[in-house]
């Protein structure tokens, strides 16, 4: 019976007499609304910006410390 469900959901036609049953449950359909997608995208972008800014701060601090004797303040 599981083969019949798989064939029914995938759209493959069964030979006559092999799969005559209809699936008991409809095919799973997932739809994510545009609002949910927008919120997820903005959240991910905001978190990526925070992580990148924190990483850049440590990189620039390390560069400043390593080059501080080469800088002329005249």
Image (cartoon, rainbow, N blue to C red):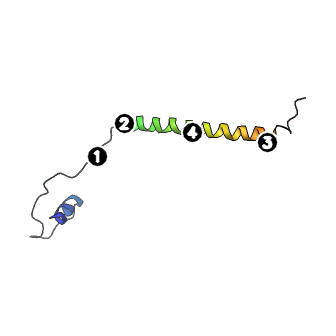
The tag on residue 30 is 1
The Cα atoms of the two marked residues, 1 and 2, are separated by: 13 Å
Q: Earlier in the sequence, mark 2 or mark 3?
A: 2
Relative to 11, 67 lies left or right = right
Q: State the residue position of label 3.
A: 66
Residue at the image position 77 percent from the left and 39 percent from the top: 65
Q: Earlier in the sequence, mark 4 or mark 2?
A: 2
In depth, the one of 31 and 61 nearer the eye is 61
Secondary structure found at label 1: loop
Residue 17: x and y in percent read 9, 70
Secondary structure found at label 3: helix
- Closer to the eye: label 3 or 1: 3
Secondary structure found at label 2: helix
In depth, the one of 31 and 49 nearer the eye is 49
Residue 34: x and y in percent read 36, 37
Q: Earlier in the sequence, mark 1 or mark 4?
A: 1
Q: Earlier in the sequence, mark 3 or mark 4?
A: 4
In depth, the one of 14 and 4 nearer the eye is 4
Q: Residues within 10 Å of mark 3 (few under 14, many from 20)?
A: few
Residue 30: x and y in percent read 28, 46
Residue 23: x and y in percent read 14, 57
**Do labels 1 and 4 touch, CB within 8 Å?**
no
**Do labels 1 and 2 touch, CB within 8 Å?**
no
The Cα atoms of the two marked residues, 4 and 2, are separated by: 22 Å
Q: State the residue position of label 2.
A: 36
The Cα atoms of the two marked residues, 3 and 1, are separated by: 53 Å
- Closer to the eye: label 2 or 3: 3
Q: State the residue position of label 4.
A: 51
Residue 31 occupies which quadrant of the picture? top left
Relative to 32, 26 lies left or right = left
């Amino acid at each position: 019976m599981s083969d019949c469900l798989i064939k029914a959901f995938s759209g493959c036609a069964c030979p006559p007499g092999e799969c005559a049953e209809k699936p008991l449950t409809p095919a799973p359909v997932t739809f994510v609304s545009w609002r949910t997608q927008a919120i997820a995208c903005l959240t991910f972008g905001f978190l990526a910006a925070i992580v990148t800014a924190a990483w850049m701060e440590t990189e620039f601090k390390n560069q400043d410390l390593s080059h501080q004797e080469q800088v002329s303040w005249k």
